[in-house]
Image (spheres, grey):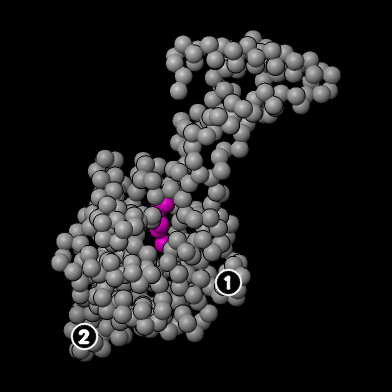
């Protein structure tokens, strides 16, 4: 915007003005009237703060330092008495930007949104699909019951012929399509450029299919680092209820349970699903797990995977329970927005409230 020469002249002018202001402030402070510094600082603050827009990635320490840059850059060179600095700094400190403050207060027992008064609002999320075997049947179940969820899909699954059309159907039926990377990579262990390619590649794919870019990132394994969080340009959505469907009601465990107890796999599936949802269970290594329903609270984000036969069996039973117990299911973004601003880039959510 400015030439270097102009910038130097401009900065020099500002320094002179600030020095003068500081001296005036000292004089006024001494006489008990120190409020006159603010107006001179305001125009610069507004100009600088326009660099950032609401909803962008929260400022890194470097970025946030650049917002009130006049204060730290210039005051060390000002020869005014040191006692004047605190006054100037205090009046010049801008509000960080218009970025909405994420809602991080503890969620209540029921929704604070009048639309859902007395209800517990939760999100069911399904990772690792779309599965050409299970996702269409899951979509049938959800459609029949008028329930909408969030799918965190993996790019590799779109290489199956029907993969893209399943995603399109899910989107058209009101479900939210989130990002679970191209190849289910561990983002924490990846080089940043690889991590960003995994994330952006999936966003591109989904945009080609649905016309809309995903806005939520669920890192595979829930694993990410500060670089990914700051650079991905998306909110990170974790969970606070892991159904453990990937372990307890996957194909292998159903088969093993059927063989051990000499019952059919359908019977085994039914027993294991019931334990997972309602009774809790003790794993073979002695670890005790609570039932899914005993962990549910208003504002929960629940983790499932639409790639297991057990999950497909569990969902209609769980939906019956939810309907009978005052729960409403919404996609993650919608759930968060019932009680606060839209999830914003760089924020991390395990539930309706950011961390
Ligand atoms: Zn996954």
Query: What number is the disc on residue 265?
Result: 2
**Magenta-colored stretch includes residue 237:** yes
Which is the main secondary structure of the residues drawn in magenta?
Answer: loop
* Rendered location of residue 211, percent (x, y): 31, 58
**Magenta-colored stretch includes residue 242:** no
* Vertical comparison of 85 with 204: above or below: above
Dot 2: what SS? helix
How busy is the neighbourhood of tag 1: few (under 14 within 10 Å), some, or many (20 plus)? few
* Vertical comparison of 81 with 271: above or below: above
* Vertical comparison of 194 with 298: above or below: above
In percent of the image, x 38 and y 55: which residue is there? 215
Spatial CA distance of label 2 from label 1 is 43 Å
* Rendered location of residue 152, percent (x, y): 32, 62
Which of the 4 quarters of the picture holds residue 105? bottom right
Q: Along the line of sight, which residue is nearer the eye, 131 or 241?
A: 131
Write down the residue under mark 1.
Answer: 115
In percent of the image, x 83 and y 23: which residue is there? 32
Can residue 50 be seen? yes
* Rendered location of residue 98, percent (x, y): 56, 43
* Rendered location of residue 66, percent (x, y): 50, 28
Span colored in magenta: 235-240
Q: Along the line of sight, which residue is nearer the eye, 47 or 277?
A: 47
Which image quarter is the N terminus in? top left
Q: Which mark lies nearer to you, 2 or 1?
A: 1
Q: Earlier in the sequence, mark 2 or mark 1?
A: 1
Check if mark 2's residue and mark 1's residue have beta carbons within 8 Å. no
Which of the 4 quarters of the picture holds residue 18? top right
In percent of the image, x 47 and y 82: which residue is there? 323
Dot 1: what SS? helix
Q: Is residue 319 left or right of residue 286?
A: right
In percent of the image, x 54 and y 19: which residue is there? 73
């Amino acid at each position: 915007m400015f030439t270097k020469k102009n910038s130097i002249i401009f900065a020099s002018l500002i320094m002179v003005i600030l020095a003068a202001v500081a001296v005036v402030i000292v004089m006024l402070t001494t006489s008990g009237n120190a409020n006159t510094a603010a107006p001179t600082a305001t125009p610069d603050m507004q100009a600088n703060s326009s660099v950032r827009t609401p909803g962008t990635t929260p400022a890194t320490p470097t970025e946030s330092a650049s917002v009130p840059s006049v204060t730290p850059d210039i005051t060390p060179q000002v020869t005014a008495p040191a006692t004047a600095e605190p006054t100037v700094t205090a009046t010049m400190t801008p509000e960080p930007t218009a970025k909405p403050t994420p809602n991080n207060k503890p969620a209540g027992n029921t929704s604070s949104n009048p639309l859902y008064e007395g209800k517990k609002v939760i999100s069911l999320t399904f990772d690792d699909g779309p599965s050409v075997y299970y996702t269409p049947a899951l979509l049938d179940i959800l459609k029949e019951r008028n329930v909408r969820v969030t799918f965190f899909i993996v790019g590799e699954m779109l290489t199956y012929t029907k993969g893209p059309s399943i995603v399109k159907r899910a989107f058209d039926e009101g479900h939210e399509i989130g990002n679970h990377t191209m190849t289910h990579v561990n983002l924490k262990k990846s080089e940043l450029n690889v991590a960003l390619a995994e994330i952006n590649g999936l966003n591109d794919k989904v945009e080609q299919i649905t016309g809309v870019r995903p806005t939520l990132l669920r890192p595979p394994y829930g694993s990410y680092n500060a670089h990914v969080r700051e650079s991905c340009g998306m909110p990170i959505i974790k969970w606070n209820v892991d159904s453990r469907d990937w372990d307890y009601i996957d194909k292998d465990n159903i088969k093993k349970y059927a063989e051990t107890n000499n019952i059919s796999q359908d019977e085994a599936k039914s027993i294991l699903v019931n334990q997972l949802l309602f009774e809790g269970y003790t794993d073979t290594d002695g670890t005790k797990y609570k039932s899914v329903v005993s962990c549910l609270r208003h504002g929960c984000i629940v983790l499932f995977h639409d790639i297991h036969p057990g999950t497909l069996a569990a969902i209609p039973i769980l939906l019956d329970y939810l309907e009978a117990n005052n729960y409403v299911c919404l996609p993650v973004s919608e759930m968060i927005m019932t009680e606060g601003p839209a999830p914003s880039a760089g924020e991390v959510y395990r539930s309706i409230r950011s961390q």
